[in-house]
Image (cartoon, helix red, strand yellow):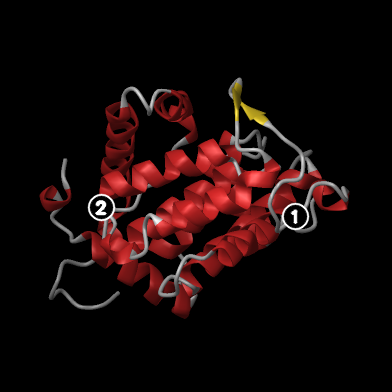
Amino acid sequence: MTQEDYPVDAARFRDVLLEQRAMQLTGGLYHLNQIHLAYNSNRIEGSQLSAEQTRYIYETQTVDGPVRVDDVAETVNHFRLFDLMLDTLREPLTLDRIKQFHGVLKQGTSDADRPWFAVGDWKRVANVVGGRATTQPSDVQDAMAALLAGYPNPAAMTFNDVCDFHHRFEVIHPFQDGNGRIGRIIMFRQCLAAGIMPFIVLDERKQSYYRGLAEYDAQPGFLRDTFRFFQDRYYDAYQQFVPLAGAGEP
């Protein structure tokens, strides 16, 4: 399905998210996106919280059962990160903003107690992801600057631009940890800014996501098709919360 195939304009999802964020409306698009994005993005990275536990944390600030402290901290932090992403949506995406996103995600975690970890700053220790080397710490600043310079107007990004940016970001792997979650929140932000149907990378399909990233240089279509699938799933799940043009505000 292409952008033109969706009965509801993708920009309406952005508008409703911003409206409901300002209203702090419960039970709507903003509320559900907070829960589902935090659950899936953290779960992909190893969180053991269930979708129900994530919902309880968001709605009641409590959680049942034995849980890892970092899982709870990073879930709460992701809620704050989502708000920051929306609150700064109309501002440029800068290197400092990306670092700020990371600082919000990792604050108060066990990683924040490690001096070498650099919460809110580029990595200081070389790392490998999926058996592949990533950009050396000394080169991250220049690599990230070049990445942003390649997309100077977020509102003009295409769907393929969003896919390309995400792959390049993950190849650079600019942070010691949290790269996937920061990359996915940036991708969500880029879709909203450009009026592209947003989507949530689902934990249940993470193997397809990983394969798409690994094979992107040789076969970019696989990741793009995976993201198109996520767009369709997103539309099916949330279109009921977005009125058709002319149907009134939520």
User: Which quadrant holds the C terminus?
Assistant: bottom left
Check residue 246 in the rendering and tell me which mark sits there, or answer none.
Answer: none
* 115 lies left or right of 139: right
Q: Position of residue 246 (x, y in %)?
A: 12, 76
Viewer-proximal residue among 192 and 121: 121
Q: Is residue 185 above or below residue 27?
A: above
* 107 lies left or right of 55: right
User: Which quadrant holds the N terminus?
Assistant: top left
Amino acid type, residue under disc 1 in the picture: Val
- Can I make out residue 143 in this image? yes
The residue at 15%/74% (across/down) is 247
Disc 2 target residue: 158
Q: Is residue 179 above or below residue 62?
A: above
Amino acid type, residue under disc 2 in the picture: Thr
The residue at 27%/39% (across/down) is 228
Q: Position of residue 186 (x, y in %)?
A: 47, 55
Q: Position of residue 189 (x, y in %)?
A: 42, 59
- Can I make out residue 51 in this image? no
